[in-house]
Image (spheres, rainbow, N blue to C red):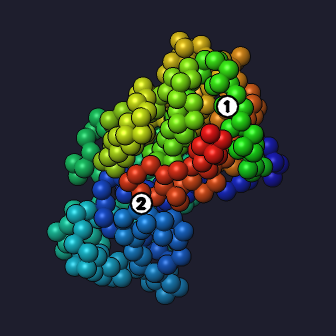
Amino acid sequence: MEIESMQYIQPRPSSIVAALYTARDLGVDVAILHGPSGCSFKHARLLEEDGMRVLTTSLADNEFIFGGHDPLVQVIHHAEEEFSPRRMAVVGTCVSMIIGEDLESAIHDAHVTTPTIAIDIHAGFRENIDGVLATLEPAAAVGWISADELERQRFCLEKANEVERLRGAASRSYIEPSRGDLKHIAAKRLIELADSGATGVAVMNAKKETAYMFADELIALHNACPDAAITYMSNLEDRGLPKVRADAARILAGMRERGLDPELIGALDEYGANGDAVGEWIGEIAPDFALIVGVPHAVPPEYTQGIEVISITNGPRQVEPLREMGHRYVLVEIDLHPKTLGVQEIVESEFGAVLRSMR
């Protein structure tokens, strides 16, 4: 096989994990992974930090041959009795797909009264959005979300995928991970620009709960340079799945409590579709410099030509594409996502701490 024929030769997000996160956003209290105990172990543990219990049927070689229907029925029944959840989801895995398990049948045979959906998914999809849609479609079928919201979610997912293919970590078969530029050097330059009287914009275009930390970077800049000619924008409009909307409301309230009231463009799940709107907003202001945090590559480079851009991501594989887009400094908030799971208040960022230390 020639290398040109490969789509990716680097690890990519899992559709099973995407299904779990989407179930969480829908208000699912207990998710049951129907597969081996180690399937999606790291993310299952992280999601438990976020308040959703993740159980497993712990399938082993015997069930690989004879099927795992009975263990699944037992775990579903146990989950209802033990945890009294408001909503449950049974999530498929590669094993359950290969042995042909009927998840709906197991839910029926468990005789539970808790609203429960079956998510038929495995890790063999090229794009993790398949896991999101595999969760949203049965959720819409039972009335957890409206048909209009399902279509809105489809659009947002398609745009997010488009951004990743064009300018993100999926834009080539392999991207070398990088820790980016040194934060204190970028912070010094940002403060120099703000103090010089230059006009700036500070943009948060963040994905879901990651905004709990990315918001801090805007707050820190406002703390450090309160009188600078900087206009602030955040994608915190009130749209999306239940958890997404609750997170946006908390983050916006937290920013306002800290003295920053940003303009609002887009919602936390619209980061991929928000690029042109943010770019046009930047064009209207015509700033000398820009701080763009969250998913900075969503903003097409034509909108930032001639502007000195400092961008912050939480993806080490995003550094190289952002530099190629012409951003002067590209910073990485390492381990941002684990630090923002399960929180309900804004979390201090490394870059924010550096900015504050310079004043």
Residue occupying the far right of the picture: 2
Q: How far from the left and from the top, in percent, is residue 114?
A: 20, 66
Residue type (three-letter) at the residue carrying disc 2: Gly
Q: Is residue 207 visible?
A: no
**Numbered label attached to residue 190:** 1
The residue under the point 43% across, 66% down is 49
Up the image or down, 18 lies above or below 271; here it is below
Up the image or down, 52 lies above or below 336; here it is below
Crowding around mark 2 (Cα neighbors within 10 Å: few <14, some 14 to 19, many 20+) is some
Up the image or down, 48 lies above or below 181; here it is below
Residue occupying the far bottom of the picture: 62
Crowding around mark 1 (Cα neighbors within 10 Å: few <14, some 14 to 19, many 20+) is many
Which of the two residues, 42 or 109, is positioned nearer the viewer here? Answer: 42
Please identify, in this view, whether the residue under mark 1 or under mark 2 is nearer the observer: 1
Which of the two residues, 1 or 49, is positioned nearer the viewer here? Answer: 49
Quarter of the image with the C terminus is: top right
The residue under the point 64% across, 18% down is 198
Q: Is residue 189 visible?
A: yes
The residue under the point 36% across, 33% down is 237
Quadrant assignment, res 236: top left
The residue under the point 70% across, 28% down is 192
Q: Is residue 347 left or right of residue 166?
A: left
Q: How far from the left and from the top, in percent, is residue 111?
A: 19, 74
Q: Is residue 106 left or right of residue 15?
A: left
Dot 1 or dot 2, earlier in sequence: 1
**Numbered label attached to residue 341:** none
> Secondary structure beneath disc 2?
loop
Q: Which residue is mark 2?
A: 342
Up the image or down, 18 lies above or below 258; here it is below
- Measured Cα–Cα span from mark 1 to mark 2: 31 Å
| Total count of labels | 2
